[in-house]
Every structure is written in C-alpha cells, then in structure tokens.
Amino acid sequence: MSTTPARTALYPGSFDPFHVGHLDVVEQAVELFGSVVVAAMHNPGKPSGVIDLETRVRLAQTSVAHLPSVRVVAFPGLAVDAARDLGADFIVKGLRSASDFDVEQQMAHTNHSVSGVRTVYVPARPDVSYVSSRFIREIGSHGGPIGHMLPAVVADEVATILRRRSDR
Ligand code: PNS
C-alpha cells in the first residue's frame, strides 16, 4: 500500500461563531490532509464580526481541542497570503448548497489565479448542512435555541455572548 505524505490545509473563514458545520469540515480535512490550520480572517483596518476576533479564535480553539493536528489562528489580510505564511498546501472549504458553490467557485478561481494555491471542497454532512453562523447569531440574539448547532463545549458560552450583545 502506498502512503501519501501528510499535507496541511488552510481553512479560512469568519467563524462568527464557529459551529458544528465548521467542525465537520475540519474533521473531514484532517482525514484528507493530516494537518489543518483554521484561520479566522480579518481586516485590521475594518473591525468586523458580532463576536470579537479574540473570542472567535478562542471558541474555535476550544471546539477543536480534541484534534491534535489542528491549530487556530487569526490572520489579517488575504487567504492566499495566509496559506503561504502558514505553510498550507491547499485551501479547504465546505459546500452546503449550490449557492455556496457559486460563491466559493469564484473565490477558488480568483485565489488560484493570483497565487497558484488550489481550493478543495468537502461536502457538508447532511445533518449539519443547514447550519449557518448568520442564523445562529440572529436566533441567539433573541435568546432562542442554538445549542444543537454549536460544538457542545462552547454552546453555553456562545449563547450567553449573543444574548448579552443584544442587550447593549
Ligand atoms: O466564513 P465566511 O464569511 O464565509 O468566510 C469568507 C472568507 C473569510 C473565507 C473570505 O472572505 C476570505 O477569504 N477573506 C480573506 C480576504 C481574501 O482573501 N479575499 C480575496 C477573496 S478571492
């Protein structure tokens, strides 16, 4: 049997917040590549996100703590620069739907055209393919049930953060 050398995949995203769909992508990427760097992307000149960057990174770190070949970082700027600086061979993305595909395909081609870095898609697990950070934020800000869409180790904290933010 031939063995494939371990590779590193970059998984860029906003992770606002990191949810069970993200965890599924990370777990699939570990199987495919060996190592994964989860990068919470941000633009230093433009604060973004409902949950602050440091907290987003910490929640993602807690969510993947059971996977020793995964690390989580914050990265300012372009995904292709993150791939180069963090030693990633590929970018990995999860696809939930045809509309995800349309957006991701344009990004993948653009990223390849400017850097030569290729993007590999993994299909979202059917039972988590409806999950989105946007709806978690919206439901969570009204105190609605979001725990089933979040990694169990961070579910209570995310619910508290989103409820508090809506009180401001
Ligand atoms: O979780 P999201 O919001 O779908 O992630 C989008 C993200 C962060 C992966 C994408 O916006 C991105 O790669 N941003 C970094 C800036 C960049 O590389 N822009 C060029 C895209 S072709």
Image (tube, rainbow, N blue to C red):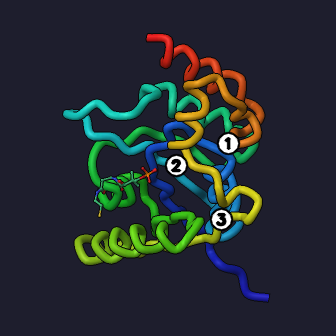
Could you tell me which residue is drawn at 72 percent across and 39 percent down?
Answer: 151
Quarter assignment of residue 143: top right
Q: Please indicate whether residue 141 sits to the left or right of residue 146 in the image.
A: left
| Front in this rendered view, residue 67 or 41 | 41
Question: What element does badge 1 sit on?
Answer: loop
Q: Identify residue type, mark 3.
A: Ala
C-alpha gap between disc 2 and disc 3: 17 Å
Q: Are marks 2 and 3 in contact (CB under 8 Å)?
A: no
| Front in this rendered view, residue 54 or 149 | 149
Question: Residue 29 in the image: x percent, y percent?
Answer: 63, 63
Sequence-wise, which precedes: disc 2 or disc 3? 2
Question: Residue 115 in the image: x percent, y percent?
Answer: 27, 71
Question: Residue 12 in the image: x percent, y percent?
Answer: 45, 53
Quarter assignment of residue 122: bottom right
Question: Is the residue at mark 1 in contact range of ligand 1, meaning its CB lies under 8 Å from it?
Answer: no
Question: What element does badge 2 sit on?
Answer: strand
Other residues around mark 2 within 10 Å, as few (<14) / some (14–19) / many (≥20): many
